[in-house]
Amino acid sequence: MRRALIVLSALLFSAVGAKAGVWETTCSGCHNGVVAPTKETLLSKFKTRREFMAAVREAVSKGKMPPGLKYGMAARELFGMAKRGGKQVSPTSSSQGKVTGDPYAKYKRFFEPLPALPPIPADNPLTPEKVQLGKMLYYDPRLSRSKIISCNTCHNLSLGGDDNVKTSLGDHWRTGGRNAPTTLNSGFLRVQFWDGRAPTLEAQAKGPIQAHVEMNSTPEIVVRRLKAIPEYVELFKKAFPGEKDPVTFENVAKAIAAFERTLNTPNSPFQRYLLGDSNALTKEQKEGMALFVKYGCIACHSGPVFSDGRFHKFKWNNDLGRYRVTKNPADKYKFRTPQLLNVAVTAPYFHDGSVNSLEEAVKIMAQKELGKKLTGEEAKKIADFLRSLTGEVPLEARLLPQLPGNNPE
Ligand code: HEC
Ligand code: HEC
Ligand code: HEC
């Protein structure tokens, strides 16, 4: 019965996913050459669709890939070929025979624990001096024209790194407001913003300072104000040793980005579970984890922060998403997969903050991204699983810094 259901839903997926490009939307997130071989590598290894599907079956039975994805459809895309035959692979119960006492342990392999730090770019090494300066700048409202708005106003580190309102105050995005995502763990995201318009945290940080709807400042104002505060000049010298004139807008962004790369939230129940504490999750949460894999949420919400960093169609309102950045018609209504760490404390959901309940968000996702109607019970289990992704915000980051200087013009 279970199996029949999976096959049935797989057929449904195929019908729904026909236009989207299954490889691009479902497989490429993991098959990026890091986690699993790229499309090119696979195509050079397998000459026929049959060989390819045999390898898929093998990988699924070994638990390397989730069951229930549109493998047959993807194979058809890659190899052309006749209509049917790419049979849906169903889960096998032989998970290499290891009895662990936790029947859900076999799902762990689909997830990655959160590393202590995200990748650090070579041109912005992480140093304690820079992080300390970045923290002050993050909290300093004097970077804004009005001197009342700081990054922490909208990305409050005591409130899950966001502002818990639908769309941020003073926010006038061109085609409607967007919800502030959390800055926690943002260093792990492959691109920044809902539409991915900033490639790095450094590039990202320059945006809100200047955006007239956010901090409405200019690089000149920022640099002038900071240079007027001797303590800041000293801190910049320490953070950027050897630079003649270290108080620059560029370095403001670098310091903030360095601080953000320390805003990681280890020690969530799920992290503890992955690292071996099989009692860290409730039975409900484990069932939710299994559904998250089986139904294919993992296809997009993958990796240490549950985001493949890619763009997927989510037609929800008239926000054109990625299209605004690329002007490519194929990108209309596409949004970058958001991370799901700490999602329980970052309501409301979606790019417009239009949904308050996590259960509701889960149901909408299943319906729109996977063509699947979840029962209330299933949605609750998955939401309960997602609640286990709430980690600990480092105390150091939450303690308000003592800001130097008084109020220069
Ligand atoms: C959750 C991550 C994930 C997703 C999603 C995923 N794969 Fe995989 N895939 C893997 C991993 C991991 C392996 C094993 C790689 C290895 O053994 O080196 C693998 C192996 C394979 C192999 C066998 C490669 C070989 O050399 O034997 C094929 C074929 C394949 N995947 C196709 C697909 C297709 C088609 C899709 C989309 C419908 C897909 N995969 C989705 C992670 C994923
Ligand atoms: C007025 C509220 C506001 C202020 C102030 C603000 N932000 Fe944001 N932030 C947002 C909104 C809204 C978005 C999403 C915009 C979008 O994607 O189009 C965002 C997005 C981000 C992201 C991307 C996260 C992701 O998941 O893509 C980061 C990182 C970030 N902001 C950091 C900062 C930093 C650093 C500052 C201070 C220099 C700052 N923000 C100031 C509202 C704000
Ligand atoms: C095809 C890729 C894809 C699949 C499959 C997918 N998601 Fe998503 N998910 C996204 C994208 C893209 C968004 C951002 C939507 C938007 O623009 O608001 C998102 C948003 C979310 C959000 C809201 C996060 C926030 O901070 O606002 C949750 C919760 C979520 N997904 C959970 C799930 C669950 C649970 C499943 C499986 C039932 C799932 N997703 C399947 C791509 C996907």
Image (cartoon, helix red, strand yellow):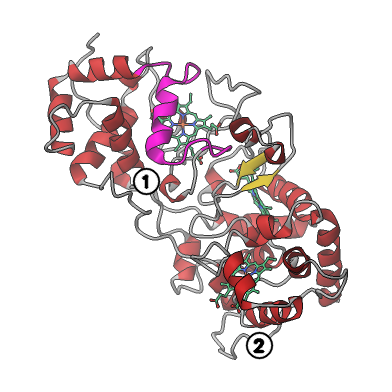
Is residue 131 positioned above or below 151 on the image?
A: below
Of callouts 2 and 1, which one flags the residue occurring earlier in the amino acid sequence?
Answer: 2
Mark seen at residue 121: none
Which quadrant of the rendered structure holds the N terminus?
bottom right
Which of the 4 image quadrants contains residue 7? Answer: bottom right
Which of the 4 image quadrants contains residue 293? Answer: bottom right
- The magenta-colored residue range is 193-218
* Residue at the spot 54% in from the left edge and 39% down from the top edge: 196
Disc 2 residue type? Ser
Q: Are marks 2 and 1 in contact (CB under 8 Å)?
A: no
Please check the rendered image and state whether residue 138 is part of the magenta-colored stretch, yes or no. Answer: no
Disc 1 residue type? Leu
Left or right of 349, for residue 235: left
Q: Which residue is mark 1?
A: 263
On the question of residue 248 being in view, the answer is yes
Q: Main secondary structure of the magenta part?
A: loop
Q: Which residue is mark 2?
A: 94
Q: Where in the figure is residue 390, as x and y percent of width and height?
A: 49, 52
Q: Where in the figure is residue 173, as x and y percent of width and height?
A: 59, 22
Is residue 2 positioned above or below 160 on the image?
A: below
Q: Nearer the viewer, residue 45 or 273?
A: 45
Q: Nearer the viewer, residue 48 or 239?
A: 48
Instruction: Farthest residue to the bottom: give it.
Output: 97
Find out if the beta carbon at label 1 lies less than 8 Å from the nearest ligand 2 atom: no
Is residue 282 positioned above or below 126 on the image?
A: below
Which of the 4 image quadrants contains residue 252? Answer: top left
* Residue at the spot 30% in from the left edge and 15% down from the top edge: 220
* Residue at the spot 18% in from the left edge and 26% down from the top edge: 232
Disc 2 to disc 1, C-alpha distance: 40 Å
